[in-house]
Image (cartoon, rainbow, N blue to C red):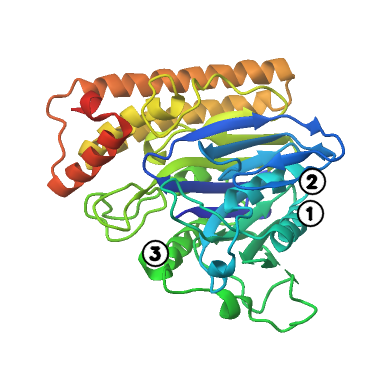
Amino acid sequence: MCDTFVALPPATSGKTVILGKSADCRTNEAHALVHVPRRTHVDGEQVLATHILIPQVRETYEIIISKSFWTWGGEIGINEFGVSIGNEAVFTTVMKEEKQDGLITMDLLRLGLERARTAREAVELMGNLVHHFGQGGNCELPGNSHWDSSYLISDTQEAWVLETAGREWAAKKSGPVASISNAFTIGKDWDLCSLSASQPNLDWGGAFADLAPVPAMGSVERQTTTCDFLKGIGGGSIGVRQAFDLLRTHGDGYHPATAKIHAICMHSGPGEMRLWNACGAMASEVSPDGILGWFTGTSGTCVSIFKPIFLGVDLPDTGTYPIETFDPKAMWWQGELLHRRAMMDFDHVVPEIRKDFEALEDDFMTQSRAVMKGSAKEKKEFMDACFHKAKEATEQWTRRLAGRKDLKFADENFHSTWEKFNQEAGLAELLD
């Protein structure tokens, strides 16, 4: 369960294109930030995606993605041309017809970023890959889930929604603001479709959407939340700070112990449909001044820090590559020590942390404007400094909460839920 949104000029300030996504995965599904430089490849070379081998292209572009540790592809990302993509799981009437492994949602996102210079090019490229290779194979850490895919794709000027059903696809050009969740949004209003020749009047969603899972996931409500938020800001006023705020939205009266709805900033809690958590978030900022990605690289967006990442330079040190069990040297798991303690007193601790972290982000954003036009060396030094400051701030809050003997779960079911997650991750003793 995820949420992706986009804002284009004239809705944004400074002629900026902003794409944001909260990536919601299983609670211990650690994410990694990965930088892949531009590369050339030899004829006949193949690339191993998550489940299958496919032919490689002659050249792949530089990308930054945030990805689940076990997948080849990513949940969110940006490339050197300013193409940004966020993906969603969607459920269709044909997805069970695929009987063999194919490309999965995350693979298609990475392939779109590695091979496309514009959003429209990514739409057609990813659609052709779906049509040729199909979508099949496990999409989730426990190894028992498959779904089809939808995407919101932006570049320097425009954005597109791409929806898939098995080996077919449809796409629609976006307005000034748009968002997607885990449900189809395209009906007869598609601009491109793999079935356009044979069914020129096709009702895409009416033909392929499986509506049964949608209510339990709150897909319609979450999409309404993101769209209303963006439309309520006012023309020309949407900036990256507003994107951060939206990605941290919980809703009035929300508490993860008792929530009956899914927030944009999702936290796991008691109940069968509460096994997912906001495991990483991104807001890309593409403007005439340059390309900048803001990534948390950690879970629990409301207690994470968005850090700047420029293309063209190596990533800062993020520690060891994370897996599904605790590693004190991995940035994602360092963030979890704070996130899981914050869950013990959500109503009081989270706002305090957020206040401190937003002040740090404001400083990062102010400085980034000058660095945007700087040299690769200046960008690298700035990124390194921001990641270091974010790590220090996270560790300071982690120590502060670790020293509080009064910090306990008030709700026993909520306590039991997180205790189970912590035991599975090898964190139980550290958080006792």
Q: Position of residue 351 (x, y in %)?
A: 30, 38
Query: N-terminal of the two: label 2 or label 3?
Result: 2
Mark 2 → mark 3, Cα distance in angstroms: 34 Å
Element carrying mark 2: loop
Residue nearest the observer in this picture, 98 or 74: 98
Q: Considering depth in this image, is 167 or 122 the residue closer to the camera?
A: 167
Question: Is there CB contact under 8 Å for labels 2 and 1?
Answer: yes
Q: Which residue is mark 2?
A: 117
Mark 3 surroundings within 10 Å by alpha-carbon count, few (fewer than 14), some (14 through 19), many (20 or more)? some
Per the image, label 3 sits on a secondary structure element best described as loop
Q: Residue at x 29, y 29 (%)?
A: 426
Identify which amino acid the numbered label 1 is placed on: Glu
Judging by the rendered image, the residue that carries numbered circle 3 is 218
Provide the residue designation for mark 1: 121
Q: Position of residue 166 (x, y in %)?
A: 62, 66
User: Which amino acid type is marked by label 3?
Assistant: Gly
Contact check, label 3 and label 1, Cβ < 8 Å: no
Alpha carbons under labels 3 and 1: distance apart: 31 Å
**Label 2 Cα neighbours within 10 Å, binned few <14 / some 14-19 / many ≥20:** some
The structure residue drawn at horizontal position 26% and vertical position 54%, both measured from the top left corner, is 253
Q: Give the residue at x 28% y 40%.
A: 421
What is the crowding at mark 1: few (fewer than 14 residues within 10 Å), some, or many (at least 20)? some
Tell me the element at label 1. helix
Q: Where residue 34 sits: x, y (%)?
A: 60, 31
The residue that appears at 47% across and 53% down in the rendered structure is: 2
Q: Residue furthest right?
A: 43
Q: Position of residue 210 (x, y in %)?
A: 49, 73
Q: Pick whichever of labels 3 and 1 is earlier in the sequence.
A: 1
Tell me if residue 362 can be seen.
yes
